[in-house]
Image (tube, rainbow, N blue to C red):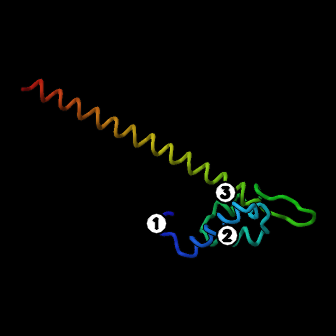
Amino acid sequence: MHEGVSAGQKAVCRSLQWQLLSGKAAHLSKETWEAIAVMTDNAAMLQKKDKYKTENGKEEEYNMCQALEELMEDNRNEGRREGRNEGRREGRNEGNLEKTKTVVRNML
């Protein structure tokens, strides 16, 4: 979990993980969706809720499974980008160090 995550947010996340694994998170009410978004301080969930809305007869339902899968994929992609950027920085630093060593050797 991220730093600064409250115990309540952790509990909600554990509950969501259980619901996701059991398949129950695929059919959430609007109120449940909004409560989860507020409790997890996730404004994007509130903004994108219509993307995950489905109709079940006259009832509106929201597919948390799909939302969480997309969120996890976004997080994985962000981690990959950060890793590549960090690798590039380290590579440049390593290259600069080698250049410095070469210059020093040539001066001796």
Pointer 2 residue: 36
Amino acid at circle 2 = Ile
Cα separation between marks 1 and 3 = 20 Å
Cα separation between marks 2 and 1 = 19 Å
At 87% across and 60% down in the image, what residue appears?
Answer: 55
Q: Which callout, 1 or 3, points at the residue further toward the start of the chain? A: 1
Amino acid at circle 1 = Glu
Q: Secondary structure at mark 1?
A: loop
- Residue 29 in the image: state x and y as whole percent: 79, 69
- Check whether the beta carbons of the residues at disc 1 and disc 3 lie within 8 A of each other: no
Q: Which callout, 3 or 2, points at the residue further toward the start of the chain? A: 2
Label 1 Cα neighbours within 10 Å, binned few <14 / some 14-19 / many ≥20: few
**Quadrant where the C terminus lies?**
top left
Pointer 3 residue: 68
Q: Which callout, 2 or 1, points at the residue further toward the start of the chain? A: 1
Label 3 Cα neighbours within 10 Å, binned few <14 / some 14-19 / many ≥20: some
In the figure, is residue 20 to the left or right of 108? right
- Check whether the beta carbons of the residues at disc 3 and disc 2 lie within 8 A of each other: no
Disc on res. 3: 1
Cα separation between marks 3 and 2 = 12 Å
Q: Secondary structure at mark 2?
A: helix
Q: Where is 17 relative to 84, above or below?
A: below
At 51% across and 63% down in the image, what residue appears?
Answer: 1
At 74% across and 71% down in the image, what residue appears?
Answer: 32
Disc on res. 42: none
At 29% across and 32% down in the image, what residue appears?
Answer: 95
Q: Where is 58 relative to 90, above or below?
A: below
